[in-house]
């Protein structure tokens, strides 16, 4: 049987060779990976496990919570609170931060997550996922507040996601490239199946919710119109379109074969910069995409350079194949100069 590299072996060897992964960070990543395994098992039960449907509550975003949203959130909190590697956690499903209880030791890391992204797809059996981001707590006082989380994405110590699809796959970066692990359900191990993933700089595939077209700003419409014009148009090539409505699934496809993902600002709610959340969706995905040679902006600025002012703030997102993100961003900057 071919020799397999487990997540633990990968992390130990990364630390030995590159020193990117202190003991506490390795423990954190392994605990999150174990929690994702438990979420994968719950997701896979479907109707057999009384995990489908809504929980009869709303989250801080005013979105109806699915039962699995709450289950996934609880799994991540319970798995991470006792280890001594974290000071606090933040989640899409919780209004405020969750400070590690005094009965446990506090660590230097902050964990942020969207416990189950794309949950509108749960009941129709389409891929969903968990997204996580790791920051370091600045300063050494015991206290921790929401302000400790408000750091730009370039400060992330690690980021990853788990996609619960035909395979359950864990995608991880600690700032030294992107590694992909596939869950071996027979042994329960995360097995390294791809390392140093690279996103092609060019693509013929874009991902956007086309039903919002009439609400888009002109640069978005220009970019998409040119893609739709195909080989007869200014791009001189035909494009394909995909939209899973599950960011983790769309990003994983782009990581695997290239593409460009867009959730831009639109006129439906002009006061909102975008739909996606900066701290636990855009930042971790931007870290992964950049580490794989791609790019990620909000249309005008690098996502990972943005300075957050609120824990649940939203942001416009374009990410993926570098040359397409640069073109999309150039169209926005040109429009801003007019
Ligand atoms: P729409 C899921 O709710 C999510 O936050 C992302 O995972 C996904 O890319 C987007 O929203 C889908 O939004 O408006 O197309 O349903």
Image (cartoon, rainbow, N blue to C red):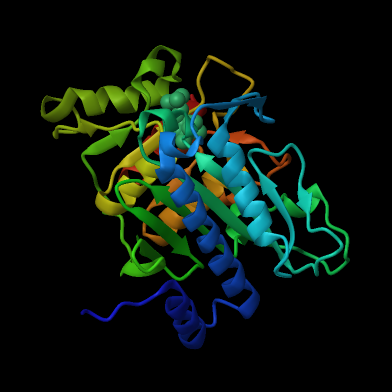
Tell me if I can see residue 152 in this picture.
no
Tally of numbered discs: 0
Q: What is the quadrant of residue 23 in the picture?
A: bottom right
Please provide percent x and percent y for residue 48: 42, 38
Please provide percent x and percent y for residue 240: 20, 32
Quadrant (top left/top right/bottom left/bottom right) for the N terminus: bottom left
Q: Residue furthest top?
A: 214
Q: Residue at x 35, y 48 (%)?
A: 252
Q: Residue furthest bottom?
A: 16
Q: Is residue 3 above or below residue 101?
A: below
Q: Is residue 216 above or below residue 258?
A: above
Please provide percent x and percent y for residue 43: 45, 43
Q: In terms of depth relative to the viewer, which is nearer, 131 or 8? A: 8
Q: Is residue 314 left or right of residue 95?
A: left
Q: Is residue 215 left or right of residue 205?
A: right
Q: What is the quadrant of residue 106 in the picture?
A: bottom right
Q: In terms of depth relative to the viewer, which is nearer, 69 or 139? A: 69
Please provide percent x and percent y for residue 320: 36, 46
Q: Is residue 50 left or right of residue 71?
A: left
Tell me if I can see residue 70 in this picture.
yes
Q: Residue at x 19, y 33 (%)?
A: 239
Q: Is residue 52 above or below residue 320?
A: above
Q: What is the quadrant of residue 206 in the picture?
A: top left
Q: In terms of depth relative to the viewer, which is nearer, 125 or 111? A: 125
Q: Residue furthest front?
A: 48
Q: In terms of depth relative to the viewer, which is nearer, 204 or 107? A: 107
Q: Is residue 221 above or below residue 178?
A: above
């Amino acid at each position: 049987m071919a020799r397999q590299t487990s997540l633990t072996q990968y992390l130990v060897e990364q630390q030995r060779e590159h020193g990117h992964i202190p003991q506490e960070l390795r423990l954190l990543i392994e605990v999150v990976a174990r929690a994702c395994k438990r979420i994968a098992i719950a997701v896979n039960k479907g109707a057999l496990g009384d995990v489908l449907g809504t929980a009869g509550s709303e989250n801080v975003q005013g979105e109806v919570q699915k039962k699995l949203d709450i289950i996934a959130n609880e799994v991540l909190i319970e798995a991470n609170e006792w280890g001594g590697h974290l000071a606090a956690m933040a989640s899409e499903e919780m209004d405020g931060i969750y400070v590690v209880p005094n009965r446990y030791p506090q660590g230097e890391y902050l964990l942020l997550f969207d416990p189950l992204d794309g949950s509108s797809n749960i009941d129709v059996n389409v891929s969903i996922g968990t997204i996580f981001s790791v920051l370091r707590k600045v300063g050494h006082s015991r206290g921790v507040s929401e302000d400790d989380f408000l750091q730009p994405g370039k400060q992330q110590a690690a980021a990853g996601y788990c996609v619960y699809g035909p395979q359950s796959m864990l995608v991880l970066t600690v700032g030294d490239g992107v590694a992909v692990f596939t869950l071996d359900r027979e042994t329960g191990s995360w097995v390294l199946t791809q390392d140093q993933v690279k996103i092609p700089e060019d693509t013929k595939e874009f991902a956007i919710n086309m039903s919002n077209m009439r609400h888009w700003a002109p640069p978005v419409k220009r970019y998409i119109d040119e893609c739709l014009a195909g080989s007869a148009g200014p791009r001189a090539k035909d494009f394909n379109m995909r939209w899973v409505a599950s960011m983790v699934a769309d990003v994983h496809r782009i990581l695997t074969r290239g593409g460009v993902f867009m959730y831009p600002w639109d006129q439906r709610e002009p006061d909102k910069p975008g739909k996606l959340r900066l701290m636990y969706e855009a930042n971790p995905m931007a870290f992964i995409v950049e580490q794989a040679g791609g790019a990620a902006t909000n249309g005008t600025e690098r996502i990972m350079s943005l300075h957050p002012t609120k824990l649940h703030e939203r942001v416009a997102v374009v990410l993926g194949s570098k040359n397409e993100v640069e073109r999309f961003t150039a169209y926005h900057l040109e429009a801003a100069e007019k």
